[in-house]
Amino acid sequence: MPRLLLTVEYDGTDFAGFQSQKNGRTVQDELNRALSKLYKEDIKVTGCSRTDAGVHARCHLSHLDVPFVIPEDRIPLAVNCDLPDDVKVREALYVRPDFSARFDITGKRYVYRIYNARTPSPLNDRYSYFCPYDLDISGMREAAVHFEGRHDFRAFCAAGGSQKTYDRLLYNVSVKPVNENHIEIEVSGQAFLYNMVRIIAGTLLEVGCGNILPSEIPDIISKGERANAGRTLPAKGLTLEEVFFDKEAAAEPISPQNS
């Protein structure tokens, strides 16, 4: 059976996360339902990550095996007709039969958004965390660099995760003011612990507020005590922006004539 890789975008506000569960609306269930209708048989997608309730995605990858071939450019149009407004397929790519959205990716890039103003903004509330305090951006930037590289990140992992090791490699951590009121904390890495990005963002926010010094970050990492790091910021500010994989090596062009 041909294998497809879908790039999916969704607003996580009204979802209980990506992964199917008994109680709660999920992105995976919506995709399975719409794709099963399109292909007229039971379809199950496998996602690149679970994403928690409330987390958004601009680029989430899922693979699936299909019973017949539809041209790649027509698949998003066909399946989006049966998907709700808060989840849509952006792109479809035929990939080699052994390609896995879980195991063949090389990393992910997340952005945590903070709305920094004196009063809340209803138009920004679904996609950012509101902070009314003046923030030390230069201090946050100085602190962010200490997270880069390979470390034991147990101090930045929430209880309830299924990890076997706390060792993780982060490629880049940066803090960027987008305009007068919007700040983006970008974290890219090979893999992540449970709530890891939201805790890193919470720790950098504490630095911005003057409660943690940038020079204290290495010590917080090395001691590995969750209580020393910042709090877990709300899911609504987090978006999965990009998933890294070798597109050229993964792709396997298929046409209806040779399927």
Image (cartoon, rainbow, N blue to C red):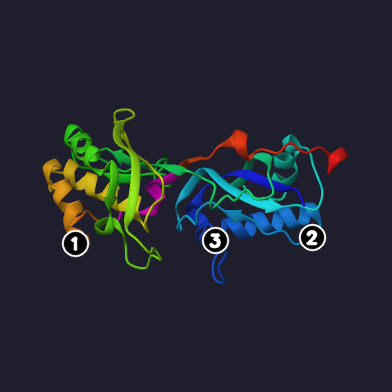
Q: Quarter of the image holding residue 27?
A: bottom right
Query: Is residue 56 shown left or right of residue 138?
Result: right
Relative vertical location of residue 155 with respect to residue 5 in this rendering, above or below: below
Which of the two labelled residues, at mark 3 and mark 1, occupies the earlier sequence position? 3
Residues under numbered marks 3 and 1 in contact, where contact means CB atoms less than 8 Å apart: no
Residue in the picture at 16% in, 57% down: 223
Which of the labelled discs sits on residue 227, or is there none? Answer: 1
Residue for badge 2: 41
What stretch of residues is rendered in magenta? 232-239
| Image quadrant in which the C terminus is located | top right
Foreground residue, 73 or 234? Answer: 73
Give, as a three-letter code, the residue at label 2.
Answer: Glu
Foreground residue, 61 or 120? Answer: 61
Q: Mark 3 to mark 1: distance in Å?
A: 29 Å
Query: Is residue 53 shown left or right of residue 183?
Result: right
Which residue of the protein is positioned furthest toward the bottom in this rendering? 22
Relative vertical location of residue 236 with respect to residue 134 in this rendering, above or below: below
Which of the labelled discs sits on residue 19, or is there none? Answer: 3
Taking the magenta stretch, the answer to whether it contains residue 202 is no
Give, as a three-letter code, the residue at label 3.
Answer: Gln
Q: Bin the neighbour count of mark 3 within 10 Å (Cα to Cα): few under 14, some 14-19, many 20 and up.
A: many
The image shows residue 17 at horizontal and vertical percentages of: 50, 58
